[in-house]
Amino acid sequence: MKSIKLAAASFFALLFFVSSANASDACACSEPYEVKPGDTLYSLAQQYGVTVEQIQNKNSMGTSTYIIAGEDILLPPEPIEDAEAQEPSAEPDSAVYVVESGDTLYNIAQSEGTTVHALQTNNDIESDVIFPGQELTIQ
């Protein structure tokens, strides 16, 4: 009976050790970053040498680019290695517009000579909600 208890205890100790090692290897943890006013996923990606998609994946955001000043997000601990894999900046014949307080998609479209639909399509926006500090590609 002692040998069964000893074998069971050894098995559970080994199981605990293996699962602890695997959890720490898979984590690739990073310290939380507090979002500041004006931060966007794009600006943070550029600042930390990662892609927007990597930040979204690290925070289980799906395709959302919505972040709020004061919230904590995780940034991937290691920058991407391959320069070709980096998210490209605005296309050559496009510009980046930074949303200011009071802006609407309609006003931006009017001032930039485009349409609300084009702004939504080019920036993966599903509604008419935009936020100060958000960067919009204008084509």
Image (cartoon, rainbow, N blue to C red):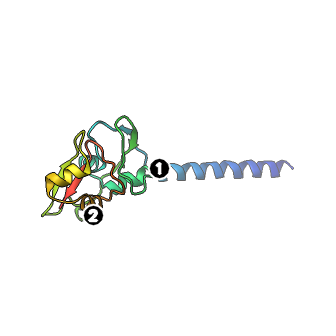
What residue lies at 81% left-to-right and 51% top-to-bottom?
3
Label total for image: 2
Q: How crowded is mark 1: few (under 14 residues within 10 Å), some or many (20 or more)?
A: few
Look at the picture and state if 34 lies above or below 62. Answer: above
Instruction: Point out residue 109 in the picture as x, y percentages from the top left corner.
Output: 20, 55
* Residue that protrudes farthest toward the left in the picture: 93
**Can residue 31 be seen in the rendering of this structure?**
no
Look at the picture and state if 101 lies above or below 119. Answer: above
For the residue labelled by badge 2, is the local secondary structure a helix, a strand or a loop?
Answer: helix
Quadrant that contains the C terminus: bottom left
What residue lies at 36% left-to-right and 51% top-to-bottom?
55
Checking the image for residue 38, the label placed there is none
Query: What amino acid is found at the position of numbered circle 1 in the picture?
Result: Cys
Q: Is residue 7 left or right of residue 97?
A: right
Which one is nearer the viewer's eye here, 65 or 6? Answer: 65
Of tags 2 and 1, which is closer to the observer?
Answer: 2
Query: Label 1 belongs to which residue?
Result: 27
Query: Label 2 belongs to which residue?
Result: 85
Among the two numbered marks 2 and 1 on one chain, the one whose residue lies closer to the N terminus:
1
